[in-house]
Amino acid sequence: MNMKNLTERQKTLLLLIIRDYIDSAQPIGSQRLVERFHLDLSPATVRNEMSALTEMGYLRQPHTSAGRVPAEEGYRVFVEQMMQQAELPIAVKNTISRQFFQARPDVERWMTLAASVLAHQSQGVSVVTAPRAATIRFKHVELIAVQGRQVLMVIVMEGGEVKQQILTLAEPVAQERLSQAAARLNALLAGLSAEGVAALSSRADALEQDVITLLAQDMKRSSESASGEIYTDGLTNVLNEPEFAESDEARWAMRLFEERSTLQDLIARASMNSGAGGLQVLIGGAGGWEELRQCSMVIASYGAPGLAMGTLGVLGPMRMSYARTIPTVRYVAGVLSNLVNDNAT
């Protein structure tokens, strides 16, 4: 459907109706529209235009009400405008940036914070996947004596993923010797894949061989994992919305957050065609996801292409605040992209 079919008056009225419905969750009548927005039009004129917008598929009329509510096509028009115009206030951007700046430089902490910020700002359900490289590559290892023969291995991959493992040695080793081994391995293995790490085992002494074996195994497991860990927040935000309180269909969408494999599939398919910063809005499941036909999802990729990429988004009722959610998702994706790039260098 082409928005060029609409007169300027119809466009204006459509956008006002959607704005009012997003705020009120109540069907919108012509009298209310004239009074709320001080329109220089009669209720009868507005009613005629609303009938025309309904016939064209931009609005629909619930059976029990004389008012109108937006149809999917109406929301698409609204979202097109929000994609171009919506901006977060500078004060909100500064607050979000400060929260990330104050957080310790740890990917898990960044993911938890991103999920929290998105849920709070959008009042929807947030979903964030940890950044993952197409090929997992080694960046850094630390070896820390714990007790007796046990050594804590802290492994950092390119892109910022951090893993911890306990390595049990044949005999206790002093911290100085562990630090020397870590320094040598960091120089020897930098930038290598799991296969590259394993191939250098022959050039190492017994202690380093033990570390390399565990490193290669851990990196191989990470590479085989379908996607990064998923972080979510804000489920209660959406369950409190009238659409979700009254509709069993809408509650089906929430099962996505219990069935992680389905959620991973949704995220992978939705983000497949977008590079870092690319943003998509899926309205009513975009015809592909039956579970989301009562919902909208704003989703974006972040990271450094070719190095490490992740996905973040917000799920909510079709009546979500796009003017707030779209710029929030876009801005947090930018913040996380910068963190991934900084952490990879």
Image (tube, grey):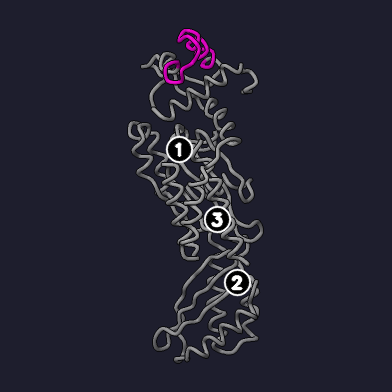
* Three-letter amino acid code of the residue under disc 2: Phe
In the rendered structure, the answer to whether residue 329 lies left or right of residue 61 reads right
Above or below 248: residue 128: below
Name the residue located 52 percent from the left edge and 79 percent from the top edge: 142
Name the residue located 50 percent from the left edge and 81 percent from the top edge: 143
Above or below 181: residue 35: above
* Label 2: which secondary element: strand
Report the disc number at residue 336: 3
Task: Examine the structure image and report whether residue 307 is included in the region drawn in magenta.
Answer: no
Name the residue located 63 percent from the left edge and 67 percent from the top edge: 345
Q: Does the image show residue 249?
A: yes
Above or below 14: residue 283: below
* Cα distance between the residues tagged 1 and 2: 39 Å
What's the magenta region? 34-54
Q: Does the image show residue 290?
A: no
Report the disc number at residue 262: none
Q: Is label 3 or label 2 in front?
A: 3
Residue that carries the numbered disc 2 in the rendered image:
138
Q: Residues within 10 Å of mark 1 (few under 14, many from 20)?
A: some
Residue that carries the numbered disc 1 in the rendered image:
291
* Three-letter amino acid code of the residue under disc 1: Glu
* Label 1: which secondary element: helix
Q: Is label 3 or label 1 in front?
A: 3
In the rendered structure, the answer to whether residue 36 lies left or right of residue 78 reads left
Task: Examine the structure image and report whether residue 44 is included in the region drawn in magenta.
Answer: yes
Q: Quadrant of residue 27?
A: top left
* Cα distance between the residues tagged 3 and 1: 29 Å
Above or below 177: residue 265: above
**Majority secondary structure in the magenta region:** helix
* Three-letter amino acid code of the residue under disc 3: Leu
3 or 2: tag closer to the N-terminus? 2
